[in-house]
Image (tube, grey):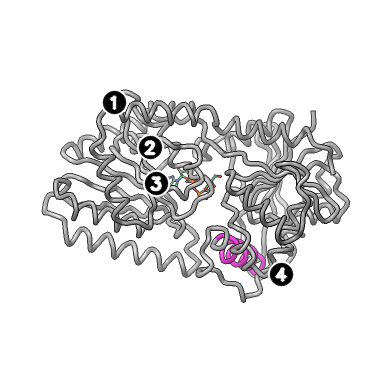
Amino acid sequence: MSRLVVVSNRLADPRKTAAGGLAVALGEALSVNGGLWFGWSGTIVEGGAPGEGEVHTQQAGNVTLTTVDLSREDHDSYYLGYSNGVLWPVFHYRLDLADFDAGYIGGYRRVNQLMARKLMPLLRPDDMIWVHDYHLIPLAAELRAMGCKNRIGFFLHIPLPPPLILAAIPQHEWLIRSLFAYDLVGFQTQSDVAHFSRYVNQEVGAEALDEHLFHAFDRTVRAQAFPIGIDVDEFSALAEGKDAVEMFNSMKGEYSRRRLLLGVERLDYSKGLPQRLRAFRQLLQQYPENLGSATLIQIASPSREALDTYSGLRQELESLCGSINGDYGELDWMPVRYIHRNVARKRLPGLYRVAKVALVTPLRDGMNLVAKEFIAAQDPADPGVLVLSRFAGAAEQLKEALLVNPYDTHGTAESIQQALQMPLAERQRRHQQLLARIREHDVHWWCKTFLQTLSGMTPG
Ligand code: ADQ
């Protein structure tokens, strides 16, 4: 059996609960035959030389964690600039927020070259390499240029936009050409695969050998959907744990007379937070029976605060929450509780369980794991209702949720009202079907299926 090498921008210690299901699943896959997890250390070296970085190694059981420091200049152009100022907005269909002109591409290439240079000497001939996400698209091409013949797979955690949106990136052809250096490219959904297929057909004249196999640039790549899941059993167990139960009880006591709605995410413009708050305001206006009762708890953790678009979003959100509370609040009832913080992972299931309705309404999302965590945390005898954006990748699987268009304020408000009034039998039926779906395609299925597909391929 070959050793697994995982490469991602950041690493997590797979032994810690706080790391989350994805890190734990990757950690398990890595430990089967003793593995290597490689990425950025999180350290930024002020005044460090571009394209250089010290390497650190740590052992976690039989998994080696190897990381590289980045100079300030590399970090700012690779991470803040190209990854999060160009690729993240464009891949989420936000051309208006992309910063194309700033010349970040040099840093993006330099860091991918640095990572390849540091990783190459650590590789063994039969290692299987699994690269994650948009920060590292050209990594395989850099490794191949250094003579790497191993099997290399890539998984894109965010959506792939349609060809005409992708084509707005000045280096779009180079990016997609880089994907052909992989043997297997995994996407979250069928619609991402369809965008890839259309792009390579229209823009580079690739030959489709079958539904999944594409030939161009003298290479053949397999592109397929592997919808990521959560560890349902681990999350349900967390829901029964001491911290989650404490959270549930204290919230239940505090809000006994209210009907709780919940939103949990990183504070990111892809998550549709202002649109959600407008829909909630519409709910209060259109259905006054919710006054004094419906309470939206919105948890939005700090994210990428060094970027201007993110601080602008924070201000917009704070002002919307303030105006809803000012217009509708009473001395003994505040319609919105907005918390700009992380909730400890062990407590999160308690919060999900106490909510009648979860609002998961991104404008665009690769998958969205919060939707799946909410389902896993529910009490099957009295489950809450999931209101889910049709633009989240998860909507391809979670058809029994109430699917909404988050741009449609009135339509979303109507669906929230429907969720608040849904009879118990219907809630139970929907929840049972959703739970079966997330169980069938959990994070272990995702990991196993991707790696089995990759291991069945001819290397190089
Ligand atoms: P994200 O955009 O980060 O991930 P998501 O899939 O929802 O989004 O995962 C977020 C994770 O962080 C969840 O496990 C959630 O519990 C946790 N989390 C978020 N906000 C939190 C808070 N305030 N407090 C505590 N925990 C919080 C990217 C893509 C997604 C894709 C994932 C995995 O954007 O579309 O589903 O990768 O592939």
Disc 2 marks a residue whose amino acid type is Arg
Q: CA distance from mark 3 to mark 1?
A: 22 Å
The quarter of the image holding the C terminus is top right
Q: Are marks 4 and 1 in contact (CB under 8 Å)?
A: no
Which dot marks residue 242? none
- Disc 4 to disc 1, C-alpha distance: 57 Å
Residue 360: which disc? 3
- Disc 3 vs disc 2: which is toward the camera? 3
Look at the image and say whether residue 106 sits in the magenta stretch.
Answer: no
Q: Are marks 3 and 1 in contact (CB under 8 Å)?
A: no
State which tag comes first along the sequence, 2 or 1. 2
Q: Secondary structure at mark 2?
A: loop
Residue 386 higher or lower than 296, as above or below? above
Is the residue marked by circle 1 packed among few (<14), some (14-19), or many (20+) residues within 10 Å? few
| Most distant residue in the top direction | 381
Vertical arrangement, residue 423 with respect to residue 83, above or below: above
- Bin the neighbour count of mark 4 within 10 Å (Cα to Cα): few under 14, some 14-19, many 20 and up: few
What is the distance, in whole Å, between disc 3 and disc 4 at their CAs? Answer: 36 Å
